[in-house]
Image: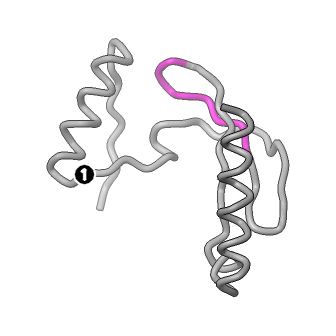
Amino acid sequence: MGCISIYFISEEKHQSWIKAFAQIGIQFSIVNLYEQGNLIGKGHFAKVILGTHRITKKEFAIKSISKEKLMMSELALVTFLYRNVLLMKLIS
């Protein structure tokens, strides 16, 4: 399946198109929406890279999780999810 690039004049238009595509079952890859930058950090299950939104140019941290390592054990999965939920609560 091919890939196309779509550019929007505003973030509002961009979000409305994403919602419309989602309603008909089309999903966007993080790779299409964000330009990947430098590695910020990494742990046992995931790495964090700097991402820049292609339209707004805002920078975000993108966490890339290794499914293979995470699915090695149920305990690893539960521990990883628990730690990430706690972290999100702390920073919000």
Q: Nearer the viewer, residue 12 or 74?
A: 74
Coloring applied to the structure = one colour
Total marks drawn? 1
Q: Residue furthest bottom?
A: 73
For this orientation, the residue located farthest to the left is: 24
Q: Quadrant of the C terminus?
A: top right
Residue 10 is situated, as x and y percent measured from the top left of the image, at 35, 13
Residue in view at x 24 percent, y 46 percent: 22
Mark 1 neighbour class, 10 Å CA radius: few under 14, some 14 to 19, many 20 or more:
few
Q: Is residue 50 left or right of residue 14?
A: right
Q: Which residue: 37% across, 47% down?
A: 28
Q: Which residues are magenta?
A: 49-56
* Residue 73 falls within the magenta-colored stretch: no
Q: Which residue is mark 1?
A: 26
Residue 55 colored in magenta in the image = yes
Vertical position of residue 14 compared to residue 44: above or below: above
Q: Quadrant of residue 81?
A: bottom right
Residue 4 image position (x, y, % from top left): 32, 43
Identify the secondary structure beneath mark 1: loop
- Quadrant placement of the N terminus: bottom left
Question: Looking at numbered disc 1 in the image, what kind of residue is underneath it?
Answer: Ile
Q: Position of residue 46 (x, y in %)?
A: 74, 61
Residue 71 falls left or right of residue 49: left
